[in-house]
């Protein structure tokens, strides 16, 4: 009963410290804005993102600037930019969310096994991790995309592969310390098995690292996904993604700068929001840091 009360107090203390941080409010507002647009895209978007309007181009065949009819203008095919950026948010956030959750699970498992067992298991797992970390993320993603046929599942797998090694390293370093703690030695002396100890005594203490990492990593995942789509090896056309939209507008930035500004602003708002939110979560989970704010 005492442990339940302590857990409740810890959670309540976290939320109190979290909402006292100004960047938590700003980050939550920006992330909430993006999520609101993505989830309600079918209601907020007045047109299909792939629909080409006859009146969506000028008499010269150029995209239309923002107006009352097209609040964010149109693209080179006469499609509504407002609808495209909303539906693009759905794909970008969905791919990033699935990739981050999968990477968090794999990275935590790999780091926990490597840190707890050490020896040959640690050597094999960490050398594989080192190989993945040796490549710059975007180059590794491009290499994988060149071998595999671009699609949403493939992009999700690529983002997972380039994202999980960093977390595996973080979790391993924490587990190396945790396995020597008194409560682990006590569980081992009482006859608890290795996997029971990892599941019930080690992993609960790595949740903080995983949560902070996942929140901060989300922004990087959105950027990498947009970069792959911009380079033509990400989510394939004609699906609407922010990276694809920037790629389509790069040759028309002089006559239609909104084709680049609109998706770029969406990426900026998303990454800024998750970075601020991740910083706030990290500081709120550490009472000593929160007290210095």
Image (cartoon, rainbow, N blue to C red):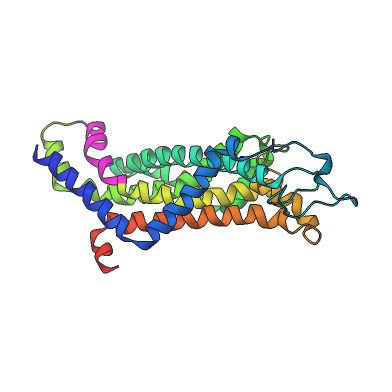
**Residue 41, image x, y percentages:** 58, 38
**Side of 129 where 170 appears, left or right:** left
Going by the picture, which residue comes out furthest to the front? 68
Residue 242 within the magenta-colored segment of the rendering:
no
Of residues 44 and 76, the one drawn nearer to the viewer in this rendering? 44
* Above-or-below relation of 158 to 224: above
Q: How many marks?
A: 0
**Residue 195, image x, y percentages:** 26, 32
Image quadrant containing the N terminus:
top left
**Residue 111, image x, y percentages:** 36, 43
Say which residue appears at 36% left-offset and 47% top-offset. 211
**Side of 205 where 215 appears, left or right:** right
Residue 197 within the magenta-colored segment of the rendering:
yes
Of residues 282 and 267, the one drawn nearer to the viewer in this rendering? 267
Q: Is residue 130 visible?
A: no
Dividing the picture into quarters, in which one does residue 207 lie?
top left
| Most common secondary structure along the magenta stretch | helix
Say which residue appears at 28% left-offset and 42% top-offset. 116
Q: Is residue 113 visible?
A: yes
Say which residue appears at 78% left-offset and 57% top-offset. 256
**Residue 50, image x, y percentages:** 73, 36
* Above-or-below relation of 109 to 292: above
Going by the picture, which residue comes out furthest to the bottom? 292
**Side of 132 where 152 appears, left or right:** right
Say which residue appears at 43% left-offset and 58% top-offset. 26
**Side of 69 where 89 appears, left or right:** left
Of residues 33 and 212, the one drawn nearer to the viewer in this rendering? 33
- Which span of residues is magenta-colored? 193-207
Going by the picture, which residue comes out furthest to the right? 60
Image quadrant containing the C terminus:
bottom left
């Amino acid at each position: 009963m005492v442990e339940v009360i302590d857990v409740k107090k810890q959670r309540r203390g976290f939320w109190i410290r979290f909402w006292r941080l100004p960047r938590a409010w700003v980050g939550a507002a920006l992330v909430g804005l993006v999520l609101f647009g993505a989830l309600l895209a079918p209601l907020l978007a007045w047109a299909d993102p792939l629909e080409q309007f006859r009146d969506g181009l000028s008499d010269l065949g150029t995209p239309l600037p923002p107006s009352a009819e097209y609040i964010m203008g149109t693209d080179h095919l006469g499609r509504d930019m407002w609808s495209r950026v909303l539906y693009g948010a759905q794909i970008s956030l969905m791919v990033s969310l699935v990739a981050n959750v999968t990477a968090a699970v794999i990275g935590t498992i790999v780091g926990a096994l490597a840190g707890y067992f050490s020896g040959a298991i640690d050597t094999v797992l960490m050398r594989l991790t080192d190989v993945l970390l040796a490549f710059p993320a975007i180059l590794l993603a491009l290499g994988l995309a060149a071998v595999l046929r671009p699609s949403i599942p493939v992009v999700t797998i690529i983002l997972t592969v380039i994202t999980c090694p960093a977390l595996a390293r973080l979790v391993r370093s924490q587990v190396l310390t945790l396995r020597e703690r008194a409560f682990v030695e006590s569980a081992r002396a009482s006859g608890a098995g290795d996997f029971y100890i990892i599941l019930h005594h080690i992993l609960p203490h790595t949740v903080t690292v995983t949560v902070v990492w996942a929140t901060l990593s989300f922004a990087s995942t959105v950027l990498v996904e947009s970069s792959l789509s911009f380079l033509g090896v990400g989510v394939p056309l004609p699906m609407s993604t922010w990276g694809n939209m920037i790629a389509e507008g790069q040759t028309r930035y002089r006559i239609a700068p909104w084709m680049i500004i609109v998706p770029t602003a969406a990426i900026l708002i998303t990454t800024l929001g998750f970075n601020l939110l991740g910083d706030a979560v990290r500081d709120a989970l550490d009472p000593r840091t929160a007290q210095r704010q």
